[in-house]
Image: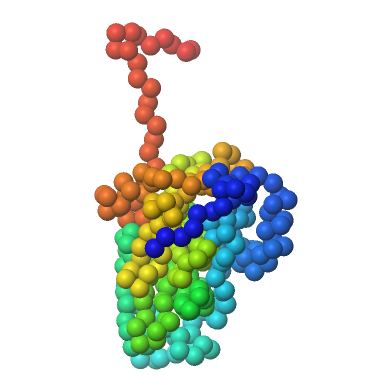
Amino acid sequence: MAFPLLDTNTHEYNNSIRISTMRRLSRFLLQYPVAALLALSPLAGHAGPDPLLAFAIDQIWHGESPAVSILEERPEAKDPKQPSRYYFVQTKDAPSYTVLNDEDASVEYAGKRFSAVKSFWGEIPVLQPENTKLLEMTVGRNRYLVLAGPGSRLFTVGDWQRYTFLEVLNVSRRAAPYHYALISDANLGERVLGRLPGSPVMNYARLVPTRWASNTEPAAYEVLIYALETQGLKRAMADDGKPLAYSLARESAGGAWQLQRIDQTPVADARDKAGLAFTVSTRYEAPAPQTNPQTKPQSTR
């Protein structure tokens, strides 16, 4: 399925989108107050995203974010016989989440059960039920229920807390729901879900770090765009027939993020070809400078 490219005839949506002034950010906050509120309302226990990074991601959706409602802030364990099964009791016809063990869980909706840990990029962790919220999103005629929460165990400490995990259910046809287990990086939470102009289904922005400012802070990403099709998760295609992807980078901490269309995603492609899980680090040290074996290095003392 092809989606229109950003208008290359405007300054704001040209092929190299420069996010450089607070005036543009102010316009964003005024024009999209709901998105601004979400950007300032992170999951419990999570840091909020970099506002300029969240703003950059919004540019991908061209201002056409899906309608979002928070149905419940957290589920409850109401069945004494199944204390590890959690329900959203205030919402009619809501999914349930069952913790099977420390490393496995399932999502159930309308009598259908789905693995909550199997994703395209390796197994994701069991969610922290006490910090998992239930969202409703609509895109055209499609209705989605989203369980969004932080991971347990390893993902409760340090840099791992930047991840949010999304259990997305397309419930447009109650008898035939579709499930997608997705990963959100950079404290973006559900903001990686959006809608491309003209798309009849939800879209997903996958961030893959490509350059690091420090051991815990990415300075650049490849951003791959997907469509949540009923046949599964598919790469979204632009009008030129190429998979839709962007580079997202900044040169210094606190600096502006630059969003630019790219035709190739070598880092993500290499990871996927090797079957690397999202938890596998690809932060490489720069090679040490080589010296001529015929020449004795000079002392700097």
Residue 43 is left or right of residue 110, and the answer is right
* Residue that appears at 58% across and 39% down: 252
* Residue that appears at 43% across and 55% down: 238
Relative to 133, residue 4 above or below: above
Q: Position of residue 2 (x, y in %)?
A: 42, 60
- Type of colouring: rainbow
Q: Nearer the viewer, residue 281 or 200?
A: 200
Q: Position of residue 137 (x, y in %)?
A: 52, 75
Q: Position of residue 166 (x, y in %)?
A: 44, 69
Relative to 83, residue 101 above or below: above
Q: Nearer the viewer, residue 300 or 279?
A: 279
Q: Nearer the viewer, residue 268 or 6?
A: 6
Residue 189 visible, this orientation: no
- Quarter in which the N terminus is drawn: bottom left
* Residue that appears at 37% across and 59% down: 235
Residue 9 is left or right of residue 291, and the answer is right
* Residue that appears at 33% across and 69% down: 232
Q: Position of residue 260 (x, y in %)?
A: 51, 46
State how many labels appear.
0
Relative to 56, residue 72 above or below: below
Query: Which image quadrant is residue 46 in?
Result: bottom right
